[in-house]
C-alpha cells in the first residue's frame, strides 16, 4: 500500500534527525521518484505555497505573539496566586495549584509550550522547596501544560478548523469539558501524591479578603477568553480577527494594567514569536505538499478500503485512530501531525458517521499526549529543563499521570456528548 511506503520513508527520515520540513518534502519527492510518477515538480512548490495561503492561518502568529506577551506580562504569576488561594489548602495543594494554573493560563495562551514555560518557572521552585521530587514536579508540569490544547483559544483547534471546515466557534467550546475532566484526573493524582508522600498536606485556607484580592488581580487576564469567545459566538469578529483582538487585549493588560511589560521588551518578543511562527508555517507548507500527493494518489480512499475491511464497527475504527495518532505524535509535533492525519482520517470519520467536532477533539486530545511522551515530547523537555531533572527521572513519575489522562481520552473518544454537548447548549441560547 502506498500509504505504508510514504510513512515508512517519512519516519526513517524523521528518526535520522532530519528537520521536519525537509523530511516532509523529501518524502514527497522520494515517493514521486520511486514510483516514477509524472507529477511536475512545480506542483509541489505550488502546493507548498497554497498550504500557507489561507487567511485563517494569519491567526497562528498572532496567537503565538499573544502567548509570548502573556507569559512575560505578569499574567502567569497572578493566575498562580489566584489558584493558590483557592486550592492551596488541599492535600497536594501545590500540585493542584500547578494543574489549575496551567488550565487557566491555557485558556488565554492556547499554546502548550507557552503554558508549560510560563507556569513552570513560577511553581517548580515552590514545589521543590515543599519537598516534591524533581521528577514528579517536572512530569506534572509536562502533562498539565498540554491542557492548553483543549481550551477555547487552542491553536491546534484553529488548524483543525482550517483543514476540516468545522466552525472554530463550535470547536472553541468543544474541548472545554474534556479539558476539565483531564484537570480533575490530574488533581486527583496530585492529592494522592501529596498524601502518600507526606510532602504536601496543604496550607492554611485563605481568608475571604485574600481570595477577593487575588480574584481582582487575576480578573482581567481570566476575562480574556470570555471576551474573545463571546465576540466569536456573537458574530462581532471572526476567529482570525479574534487573534488580533487577543494581541491588543494582551498588550493592554500586560503593559498598562499590570505594567510588568516594557516597550523595550516588545521587539524581542516579536522576534521570538516570528521565529516560532515561521517554523510552524514552513512545516504547514511542507505538509500541504505531502497532503497534495496523498490526495492525487487517492491514498485516503485506499486507507478507507483497508480500514473498512478491518474495522466493521465504529468503536474498532476509533481504537485504531487512537493508536495511530499516539504513534504519529511520538515523532511529530501536534500541528504538523494534525495536518498530516486529518486529510486521511476525516473521510473515514464521515464514512463511520462520526461528528467532525467530536473528531477534532479526539485527534487533539491524542496528539496532546504525544507532547509529553518520550523521547521527543515538547512540554516534556521544557518541564525537565525547568525542574533540572533527567528524562529518565521524569519518566518514572510520568506513567501514572499519563494513565489518568489517557483514561479521559478514552472517555472522550467513546462518549461524543462530552465534546458536543456544550457547543449545542450554547448555540441554543442564541
Image (tube, helix red, strand yellow):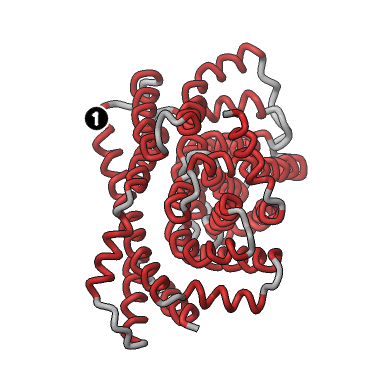
The residue positioned 45% from the left and 29% from the top of the image is: 231
Q: Position of residue 181 (x, y in %)?
A: 68, 43
Q: Position of residue 280 (x, y in %)?
A: 35, 54
Q: Residue 400 vs residue 265: left or right?
A: right
Please say if 113 is above or below 334.
above
The residue positioned 30% from the left and 38% from the top of the image is: 269
Please state, as top left, top right, bottom left or bottom right, where the C terminus lies in the image. Answer: top right
- Residue under label 1, please give it: 264
Q: Quadrant of residue 15?
A: bottom left
The residue positioned 58% from the left and 55% from the top of the image is: 359
Q: Position of residue 158 (x, y in %)?
A: 45, 47
Secondary structure under the numbered disc 1 in the rendered image: helix
In-front residue for pair 139/58:
58
Please say if 424 is above or below 287.
above
Q: Does residue 189 appear in this view?
A: yes
In-front residue for pair 49/371:
49
Q: Does residue 131 appear in this view?
A: no
Q: Quadrant of residue 203?
A: top right
Q: Residues within 10 Å of mark 1 (few under 14, many from 20)?
A: few
Amino acid at each position: 500500500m502506498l500509504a505504508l511506503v510514504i510513512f515508512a520513508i517519512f519516519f526513517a527520515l524523521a528518526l535520522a534527525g532530519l528537520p521536519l520540513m525537509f523530511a516532509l518534502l523529501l518524502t514527497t519527492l522520494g515517493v514521486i521518484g520511486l514510483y516514477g510518477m509524472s507529477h511536475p515538480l512545480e506542483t509541489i512548490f505550488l502546493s507548498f505555497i497554497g498550504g500557507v495561503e489561507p487567511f485563517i492561518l494569519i491567526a497562528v502568529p498572532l496567537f503565538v505573539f499573544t502567548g509570548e506577551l502573556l507569559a512575560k506580562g505578569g499574567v502567569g504569576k497572578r493566575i498562580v496566586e489566584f489558584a493558590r488561594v483557592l486550592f492551596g489548602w488541599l492535600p497536594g495543594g501545590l500540585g493542584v495549584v500547578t494543574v489549575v494554573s496551567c488550565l487557566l493560563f491555557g485558556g488565554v495562551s492556547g499554546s502548550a509550550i507557552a503554558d508549560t514555560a510560563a507556569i513552570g518557572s513560577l511553581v517548580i521552585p515552590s514545589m521543590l522547596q515543599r519537598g516534591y521530587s524533581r521528577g514528579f514536579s517536572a512530569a506534572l508540569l509536562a502533562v498539565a501544560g498540554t491542557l492548553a490544547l483543549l481550551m477555547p483559544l487552542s491553536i491546534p483547534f484553529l488548524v483543525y478548523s482550517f483543514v476540516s471546515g468545522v466552525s472554530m466557534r463550535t470547536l472553541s467550546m468543544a474541548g472545554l469539558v474534556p479539558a476539565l475532566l483531564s484537570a480533575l484526573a490530574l488533581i486527583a493524582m496530585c492529592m494522592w501524591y501529596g498524601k502518600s508522600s507526606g510532602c504536601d498536606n496543604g496550607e492554611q485556607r485563605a481568608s475571604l479578603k485574600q481570595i477577593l484580592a487575588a480574584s481582582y488581580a487575576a480578573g482581567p487576564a481570566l476575562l480574556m477568553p470570555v471576551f474573545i469567545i463571546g465576540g466569536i459566538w456573537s458574530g462581532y469578529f471572526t476567529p482570525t480577527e479574534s487573534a488580533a483582538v487577543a494581541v491588543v487585549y494582551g498588550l493592554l493588560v500586560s503593559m498598562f494594567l499590570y505594567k510588568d511589560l516594557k516597550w523595550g521588551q516588545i521587539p524581542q518578543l516579536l522576534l521570538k514569536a516570528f521565529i516560532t511562527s515561521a517554523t510552524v508555517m514552513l512545516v504547514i507548507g511542507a505538509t500541504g505538499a505531502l497532503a497534495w500527493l496523498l490526495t492525487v494518489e487517492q491514498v485516503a480512499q485506499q486507507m478507507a478500503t483497508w480500514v473498512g475491511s478491518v474495522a466493521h464497527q465504529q468503536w474498532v475504527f476509533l481504537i485504531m485512530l487512537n493508536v495511530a495518532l499516539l504513534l504519529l505524535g511520538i515523532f511529530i509535533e501536534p500541528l504538523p501531525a494534525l495536518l498530516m492525519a486529518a486529510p486521511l482520517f476525516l473521510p473515514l470519520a464521515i464514512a463511520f458517521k462520526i461528528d467532525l467536532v467530536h473528531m477534532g477533539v479526539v485527534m487533539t486530545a491524542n496528539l496532546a499526549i504525544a507532547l509529553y511522551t518520550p523521547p521527543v515530547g515538547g512540554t516534556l523537555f521544557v518541564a525537565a529543563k525547568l525542574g533540572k531533572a533527567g528524562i529518565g527521572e521524569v519518566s518514572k513519575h510520568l506513567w501514572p499521570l499519563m494513565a489518568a489522562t489517557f483514561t479521559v481520552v478514552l472517555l472522550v473518544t467513546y462518549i461524543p456528548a462530552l465534546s458536543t454537548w456544550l457547543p449545542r447548549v450554547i448555540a441554543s441560547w442564541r
